[in-house]
Amino acid sequence: MTSRRHRVVVVGGGFGGINVTHALARADVDVTIVDRTNHHLFQPLLYQVAAGILPEGLIAPALRNVIRKQANARTLLADVKDLDVHGRMVSAVAPDGRKLALPYDTLVVAGGATDAYFGHEEWAEFAPGMKTLEDARHLRSHILSAFEMAELANDPAERAAYLTFVVVGAGPTGVELVGQLAELAHQVLPREYRSVATTEAKILLLEGAPAVLGAFHPKLQRYTQRRLEKMGVEVRLNTMAIAMDHDSITVQHPGGEERIPARTKIWAAGVRASPLAGMLAAATGAETDRGGRVVVMPDCSLPGYPEVFAVGDMISLDQLPGVAQPAIQEGKYVGKLIRARLEGGTQAKPFRYFNKGSMATIGHLSAVTESFGMRFTGMIGYTMWGSVHVLYLVGWGNRLAAIYTWARALTFTHNRAHRVITFEQARYEVTEHAATDSPGI
Ligand SMILES: Cc1cc2nc3c(=O)[nH]c(=O)nc-3n(C[C@H](O)[C@H](O)[C@H](O)COP(=O)(O)OP(=O)(O)OC[C@H]3O[C@@H](n4cnc5c(N)ncnc54)[C@H](O)[C@@H]3O)c2cc1C
């Protein structure tokens, strides 16, 4: 595509990138989104793919489809490798290895975040995280394979290790994951297994801090812990992972050290900005914070480079948390700012965040939400959580399909319809040391 119009390159088609793009729909520009996946991923519902509730297409519509009505936008499947802010060029590599050079007039980088293992990167092999669709598929295979192997195991210790699931980190993702593991073990699977009592599964939630859901009000923290314990989850606070291997995890708690045999460990303990943040900082001389996030100006631009912006999880601005709303609002703001500049607008106002609150789901018909000083739990919290999440899915088809699937899976049948694994996948999960780059999953 050759163009004489103002060229905007957007790196990343997540919450930040897609909102920049939509905000430029009526601008006199050509927008190119470069993403190394072909989809716009709704990460808040990834755990439901890992738990076999939702099919992946519902939470990951094709980017092409998302922007199909926006004639001034296109998307390319490529991995961005370099940002040349002096030559105004983005370098990327396509899946077949061909190199792409994408010139820009305005650049927006929205690369998101990745898992952080706090100096123990080797743990990624034993305790995968959940950031991408591949991660969720991999976890689903791993969890289902563990139950299958427990059914086959004759040795009680081996069976117990297969039936022990440890989630490290009690933020919203950790809480959601243990909630689903408890539902699988106690409600969905018991009637389907013959040799093993899946209700014997041990589900542990480890948290280094003295409470679950650190960012929430203490009342909601206590409610969440009580609910989880009622569902059969063992919540261990003030407990840090200090070592792990294929078969176990060793933790440090006030009582000392303990080795817990467990074939399934899941990492939900920390995030770090995408490497694109460091790349951008190195190129522009901007600073990064402890989480590797690039420090941006109040209008989300990079210091000294008014034509280069960054938004979402990879930036440090006003101590905003790495959740969807800042990314969405920053994306919209930057899109409008670019348009206003091209139309000769006056100096832009700095970005202002509008805090709509936070929420986390725990399990069957139970969630916690806090919004505008009001707090809700249980069924009311769950209804609010469900409504907001459905609303933010892309497309009415996906929204209706999600409601239908939830009604079936969570309310009436207690079934999880999306539980397909093959022999090869299970073999991979139980013989290879769980890795994050498994092909064919
Ligand atoms: C499991 C999980 C649950 C969550 N739950 C919630 C929740 O309940 N509520 C909430 O508000 N927030 C939640 N979040 C956080 C929320 O999803 C993020 O804050 C939000 O997605 C950030 O948007 P973003 O645009 O910065 O990044 P992302 O949405 O992550 O998008 C980044 C995009 O950049 C692409 N990319 C990265 N590197 C490159 C590269 N080198 N080349 C090309 N493309 C690249 C990626 O493929 C991706 O599409 C959750 C996150 C996770 C992982």
Image (spheres, rainbow, N blue to C red):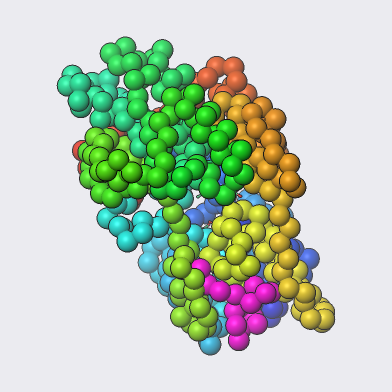
Quadrant in the picture for the C terminus: top left
The residue positioned 56% from the left and 65% from the top of the image is 110
Place residue 68 in its image quadrant: bottom right
Q: Is residue 169 visible?
A: no
Q: Is residue 227 above or below residue 299?
A: above
Going by the picture, which residue comes out furthest to the front?
255
x and y percentages locating residue 317 in the rendered image: 61, 69
- Relative horizontal placement of residue 301, taking residue 194 as reference (left or right): right
Quadrant in the picture for the N terminus: bottom right
Place residue 408 in its image quadrant: top right
x and y percentages locating residue 270 in the rendered image: 44, 54
x and y percentages locating residue 407 in the rendered image: 62, 24
**296 magenta-colored:** yes
Segment tinted magenta in the rendering: 293-308
Place residue 386 in its image quadrant: top right
The residue positioned 46% from the left and 45% from the top of the image is 210
Q: Is residue 152 above or below residue 13?
A: above
361, 220: nearer the viewer:
220
